[in-house]
Image: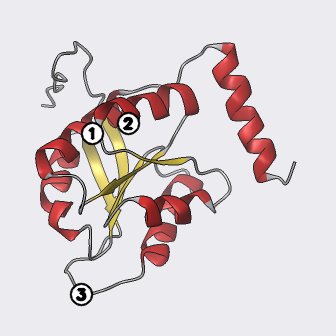
Amino acid sequence: MHTPETLSGDEQHIPFRDVIGFANDHAGFPLRPPVLDLLGRHSGRIIDVGARSEEPVDFPDITRRAVQTILDGDTDRVILLCGTGAGACIAANKVRGIRAAVAHDTYVARQAVVHDDVNVLCIGAWITGPQVALDIVRHFLAAQFSDEEHFRRRVAKLALLEQGG
């Protein structure tokens, strides 16, 4: 039976998700085991398209496969791990319908979802240690997009930018 995990200093619980997308490149490989372990406790299935070793791979390829799980309707959230988080974030944001953010702290991870409806979290393994990375993932998964009109309006404008407008 699934028991929700309480966030440090917060009474929110991480909702159980049927499916979570996940990927890492070779630079993100060191964070792979602890993050997958956490995701396994909070989802019925992980769609894992990440590198299985530190053998170099190209982050745009890994990122594209991971964000495709959102576009296909298999999940609504994806976690990406690379060296700094920046490369995966740039690649993800090139894909229409994806809103990715790099987060190296829990505040950004939460606010990016609440204010900007971010659906892809990018973490840099060269920047972030395992415990902090797990806290970041917890806050990302627990956060929900705000129903306040000004946030919805801004996200709608982001969608217009994707269309070239």
Q: Judge from the rendering whether residue 48 lies leftward or rightward of residue 75; answer left or right.
A: left
- Residue lying at the far front in this picture: please name it: 127
On the image, the x and y values in percent for residue 111 come to 44, 28
Compare marks 2 and 3 and give the one earlier in the sequence: 3
Q: Quadrant of the N terminus?
A: top left
* Element on which disc 1 rests: helix
- How many residues crowd mark 1 within 10 Å: few (<14), some (14–19), many (20+)? many
- From mark 2 to mark 3, how far is it between C-alphas? 28 Å
CB-based contact (under 8 Å), mark 2 and mark 3: no
* Element on which disc 2 rests: helix
On the image, the x and y values in percent for residue 117 come to 55, 34
- Residue lying at the far bottom in this picture: please name it: 55
Compare marks 1 and 2 and give the one earlier in the sequence: 2
Amino acid tagged 1: Ile
* Element on which disc 3 rests: loop
> Where is mark 2, residue-wise?
109
* Residue at 27% in and 39% down: 136
Q: Judge from the rendering whether residue 136 lies leftward or rightward of residue 159; answer left or right.
A: left
Viewer-nearest residue: 72 or 145: 145
Classify 26 as above or below 28: below
CB-based contact (under 8 Å), mark 1 and mark 2: yes
* Residue at 17% in and 16% down: 9
Q: Judge from the rendering whether residue 34 lies leftward or rightward of residue 27; answer left or right.
A: left
Observer able to see residue 98: yes
Mark sitting on residue 136: 1
- From mark 3 to mark 1, how far is it between C-alphas? 26 Å
- From mark 1 to mark 2, how far is it between C-alphas? 6 Å
> Where is mark 3, residue-wise?
55
* Residue at 27% in and 17% down: 12
